[in-house]
Amino acid sequence: MKLQKNTLLALCSVLEFAAQPGRQLSTAEIAHKYGASAHHLAKVLGKLRGAGLVSAARGSGGGYRFSGNAKRVTLLDVIALFERIGAPRAAPRRAFERALDQVLAEIDETAKATFGSITLETLLKLARR
Amino acid sequence: MIHVNQIRGARRRDLAQVIEIDARITGLRKPAYWTGILRRYGGRSPGRFFLVAIEGNEVQGYAVGEVRDWEFGSPPCGWVFGLGVRPETRLRGTGTRLLEAMCAAFRRRRVEKVRTLLARDNALVLAFFRSQGMMAAPFIALERDL
């Protein structure tokens, strides 16, 4: 199971914000920590902002702060903003392809259930263990 | 914030409320099933537990579990196979207290692992068990049509 670079950056960013809900963090701070370009991260944060997970902080330094509900937002909610797990594939015609497709769909369903069952708060707890 | 003031073994007089809570969650009333659960898990059977969370005189939630030995080669471990909380009193720690009490009962039986099995589309209860630190077990549940 592999997530796209953007998705991973979004997950790490939203966790950074959720871990310190009152604090505003600058794009540069997060970009530096995760080795991403500030321009790239700004696009990712723009999507998170659009989904109401972060809000732009006013005042000196700018940046963003967490505005979601860490007890309710799941990893799947964040992932779904950037990619689709189990995106429909073209209907395979050959028997082997159809059978393989069934196995891949099974893996996708398990991945979705896993991501959908882990809230940001649960992941923060896991990281602190 | 925890309001439940007692976790104890289920009694016959709790059964109607347990049936009602389960019916509200699942949409199905199963009196015969719960009567059987009380008979098999409600007494002092070693390694079997049917617990209820009480607030005032009202049952707020229930949990059912047992210690299973060497199932599919696994050393004895605790299984939680039923847990429900009144929908209107969720997010008050009732489920957490029930699971803690169940885990304490398992520990007294000297088992070191607790497991459960859930439908993968049951996001609410999956998220609850995840929030309690539970991770995927090294098993895969399989089925087929008969």
Image: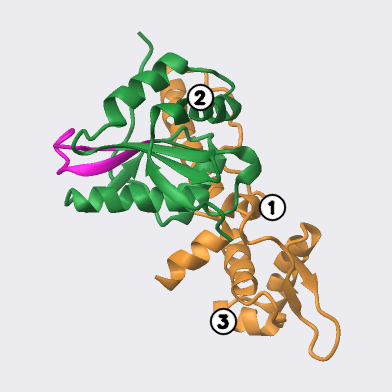
Chain colours: A orange, B green
Comes first in the chain, label 3 or label 1 = 3
Image location of residue A71, percent across then percent down: 61, 58
Q: Look at the numbered disc 2 and give the secondary structure of its residue.
A: helix
The residue singled out by tag 1 in the image is: A81
A44 is higher (above) or lower (below) than A88: below
Whether residue A96 is visible here, answered yes or no, is no
For discs 2 and 1, the disc positioned in front in the rendered view: 2
Chain that bears disc 1 = A
Instruction: Give the magenta part as a residue range.
Output: B66-81
Q: Nearer the viewer, residue B63 or A89?
A: B63
Q: How far apart in space, not on screen, are marks 2 and 1 (Cα)?
A: 44 Å
Chain that bears disc 2 = B
The residue under label 1 is which amino acid type? Leu
Q: Quadrant of the C terminus of chain A?
A: bottom left
The residue under label 3 is which amino acid type? Lys
For discs 3 and 2, the disc positioned in front in the rendered view: 2
Whether residue B71 is visible here, answered yes or no, is yes
Q: Nearer the viewer, residue A37 or B134?
A: B134
Q: Look at the numbered disc 3 and give the secondary structure of its residue.
A: helix
Q: Which mark is residue A33?
A: 3
Image location of residue B34, percent across then percent down: 41, 22
Pointer 2: residues within 10 angstroms few (<14), some, or many (20+)? few
Pointer 1: residues within 10 angstroms few (<14), some, or many (20+)? some
Chain that bears disc 3 = A
The residue under label 2 is which amino acid type? Ala
The residue singled out by tag 2 in the image is: B16
Residue at x 38% of width, y 19% of height: B35
* Co-location on one chain, circles 3 and 1: yes
